[in-house]
Amino acid sequence: MTTLISLLVRLYAAVFGTLQRLTDRWLIGLAARFVFASALFVYFWNSALTKIGPGLLGFLEPTDGAYVQILPKMMEAAGYDTSAIEFFPYGLIVLLGTWAEFLLPLMIVLGLFTRAASLGFIVFIAVMSYVDITGHNLDAATIGTLFDGKPGGLIADQRLMWGFLLLVLALRGAGAISLDHLLARWWRERY
């Protein structure tokens, strides 16, 4: 019996050790970026599009909707008049938040400065969640609770999974199939 268990343990270690060695440098980062691209990229890109003004330079002028989404209580207090809100720091917060919603997901999908972009997006999601809870007054069912056995809580459950996916990218990187890898190789060859 001990010999059989020993054989099974060695077989298990050999099979999964080989799989890990074969996939270690590329699969996790690529898979995490693929999941992010398929599940979240278009969601955040479309959300960011609602925050920019019209025309070629619209990205320099956030819409009223951007202010309502990012600073809901302040917009309400200002009678939904963006001119009543000072640019520094509030308008700058809206502008940078809008840019972050475009740039960070794009960087993650491309695998460009992925670790920094993922950490930045974790902060983005934490701030977004805080604003949703306190500024948009979400109800308890929408917020959810960890360990409640109900996986539909938009904040507690969904955003925890988003954060975990981004944490994997922040800790493991984008992998060998990424712009990060190409830049690192170029840098090593050049310097």
Image (tube, grey):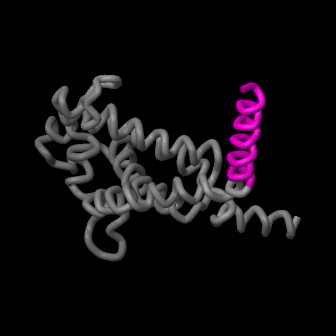
Q: Quadrant of the N terminus?
A: top right
Q: Residue furthest bottom?
A: 56
Left or right of 183: which side holds 132? left
Q: Is residue 185 above or below residue 18?
A: below
Q: Is residue 75 magenta?
A: no
Image coordinates of residue 69 in percent, x first then y, are 24, 46
Which residue is most to the front? 1
Q: Position of residue 99 (x, y in %)?
A: 42, 57
What residue sits 45% from the left and 40% below the top? 163
**From the viewer's perspective, is 11 left or right of 150?**
right
Q: Quadrant of residue 45?
A: bottom left
Q: Quadrant of residue 3?
A: top right
Image height check: is 62 above or below 150?
A: below
Taking 100 as reference, is 156 above or below it? Answer: above
- Who's the residue at 20% across and 34% down the image? 142
Question: Is residue 54 left or right of 17 when viewed as pictured?
Answer: left
Q: Residue 73: tell me if it is visible.
A: no
> What span is colored magenta in the figure?
1-21
Q: Main secondary structure of the magenta part?
A: helix
Foreground pick, 182 / 29: 29
- Nearest the eye: 134 or 146: 146
Q: Position of residue 107 (x, y in %)?
A: 53, 60
- Count the marks: 0
Q: Does residue 18 lie above or below 126 as drawn?
A: below
At a point 34% along the width and 23% down the height, the residue shown is: 147
